[in-house]
Amino acid sequence: MFSQKTYVKKIDENNLLTDEGWLQNGLKNDYWFHYHSNGNIKSQGNYNQNLKNGYWKYYLDSSKLIKEGRYKNNSKEGFWTTYHPNGINKSRGNYTLNLRNGYWEFLNETNKIIEEGAFKNNTKEGFWKLYYPNGTIKKEGHFKNGTKSNWWLFYTKNGVLNYKCQLKNNQKNGYCLIYLKDEIVKIEKYIADKKINEWTDIKSFKKENNLSDLK
């Protein structure tokens, strides 16, 4: 049976255009525009039987592009980019079935990376780096199931190593090594974020522990 396509425009109670595009058998198909109340485009892209498919763009009411990427059957799929209001990239990376997967990076309004690392099904996993607003390294380490785990390194705003700690579920759990001019000046031990012991030099630490515990 022949299915007729009709181009429609939707108007709200204030006689403002809200949406326009093609209907086929009562379902959105092909290219559509959606509008802010001030008349500027809010989003635009393709539908296939009411499901978003292909490339879409989204805008602020000021017409600034805020995000863009692809859909597959209404789920974000492939590379997406978001933007700050000043047009600088805010985030970029890949989706699989609407979930972040693989390498992502997040940037501030001056185009400096503030976070970078990998996701697995929308959860941070593996090695990540976080940065100060000026772009120097702030901390780095591993995530496991979305929480900080294993050794994490923490830096001053000048990029100098300040201390490193063993973490578990975002808490200090194990040893923390405090540095001054690249030399260890103190070793602390924690359980569930509570300090239970400390040593002010390697010699005293070695009397009670194995150096291999610090690897």
Image (tube, grey):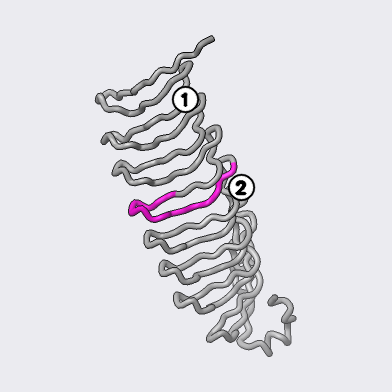
Circle 2: residue type? Asn
Please name whichever residue, 3 or 61, is drawn nearer the observer in this view of the structure: 3
102 to 130, vertically: above or below: above
SS for callout 1: strand
Q: Which mark is residue 29?
A: 1
The residue that disc 2 covers is: 121
Q: Which residue occupies 44% across, 44% down?
A: 68
Rendering coords of residue 117 (x, y %): 56, 59
Rendering coords of residue 89 (x, y %): 42, 54
Question: What are the residue bounds of the magenta stretch?
Answer: 82-96
59 to 215, vertically: above or below: above
Quadrant housing residue 45: top left
140 to 197, vertically: above or below: above
Whether residue 188 sits left or right of residue 115 in the image: it is right
Rendering coords of residue 133 (x, y %): 41, 66
Figure quadrant of the C terminus? bottom right
Whether residue 170 sits left or right of residue 211 in the image: it is left
199 to 129, vertically: above or below: below
* Mark closer to the chain start, 1 or 2: 1
Circle 1: residue type? Asn
Q: Which residue occupies 30% across, 27% down?
A: 17
